[in-house]
Image (tube, rainbow, N blue to C red):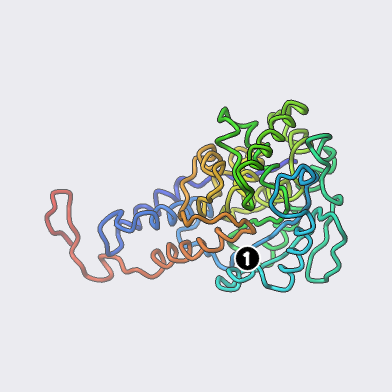
Amino acid sequence: MNSSIPPFCHEMVEEARAYLDQLTKPPGSLGRLEEVAVELAGMTGELHPRVTPPGVLVFAADHGIAEEGVSAYPAEVTAQMVYNFANGGAAINVFSRRIDALLEIVDVGVAVPIEDERVIVKKVRHGTGNFAKTEAMTPEEAEQALHVGYERAARIIGQGARTFIAGEMGIGNTTAASALLATLTDEPLEHIVGKGTGIAAERLVHKQEVIRQALALHRPDPAKPIEWLAKIGGLEIAAMAGAMLAAAERRIPILLDGFICTVAALVARQFAVNVTDYMIAGHRSQEPGHSIALRLLEKDPLLDLGMRLGEGSGAAVAFPLLISAMAMVNEMATFASAGISTANAKGEKGR
């Protein structure tokens, strides 16, 4: 998976900071909104970038590891939720409508056939293998899933998307994401693995042990990212990573969702370190591993609402903050245009 991501524009960052200090407010008084505006300028290379419409891609795939009883829901829920997405009834549909997003649902590996023209079928295989017993997929399949994500992101950006949001659906995917994350940190599994869809305490211990044994079986090495993904990854996680690489190549800001999405961001980083320059963390989820993943990415989330749904829902809820940041840049008056006195370094009035 070769990627050519342009460098972050530090010159535009300085220009944006200087411009924000000319607006009719004390310097830095709009806090994180100012930081977001500066980041967006550096990502896009523009002082006044467009962030609308956002493009949302929800990738769906099943996980063989679900056979180990690591989820509160049966595996057939993946396909059922895909049809719910197609019918417009899921949280990501509701939130996407509120932000006028371009939304696509992509079947990259659902275990059963999806027969709905509103779903884009790019199935690499019918779910992954059970990585507690065998490799999740072949290296060729991992690379194919990456390319599915890359191509769909390139397409939705070509349709006009100016911010990219990746979502996912796949029963068992917190287990796969936890296993991937565990190979990137020295944190104990007990700090990484959470309840996912809401499993009971005793099943949580079982989930941790399943991951521990699988890692001992495969000894996955993130320095070999395709093999790493193939051993313990998920098809939708790979697709999200590929999509993020496509967005960064095109200087499109990536607004991250929760735990699964942030692990996918770490996967993308294994292929191109500077892809993280184009990422903004939308929120912090309740899944304990999410804080660890955010720390590895060196990202501070915009929101912390106790969410743990996935689908891209948290990022969609956070997106209006990007709109506000751009409205600040585009619509606020400067001290000069408004004829308002400024303050010099000694606190004296100036013009």
Front-lying residue, 96 or 77: 77
Hey, what amino acid is under mark 1?
A: Ile
Q: Is residue 326 left or right of residue 288?
A: left
What is the x, y in percent for residue 161?
63, 64
Quadrant occupied by the C terminus: bottom left
In the picture shown, does residue 96 fall above or below 288? below
Q: How many marks?
A: 1
> Which residue is at the front of the view, 161 or 195?
195
Q: Is residue 296 visible?
A: yes
Residue 316 in the image: x percent, y percent?
Answer: 56, 63
Residue 114, compared with residue 242, is above or below; it is: below
Quadrant (top left/top right/bottom left/bottom right) for the N terminus: top right
Q: Residue at x 59, y 65 (%)?
A: 54
- The residue at the point 56 percent across, 73 percent down is 98
Which quadrant holds residue 6? top right
Q: Residue at x 57, y 30 (%)?
A: 188
In this view, the residue in front, 23 or 174, is 174
| 3 sits to left or right of 275 | right
Quarter residue 216 falls in? top right
Q: What residue would you read off at disc 1? A: 92
Task: Answer few, some or many: residues within 10 Å of disc 1's Cα (few below 14, many 20 plus, some between 14 and 19).
Answer: many
Residue under the point 62% across and 52% down: 198
Q: Nearer the viewer, residue 1 or 282?
A: 282
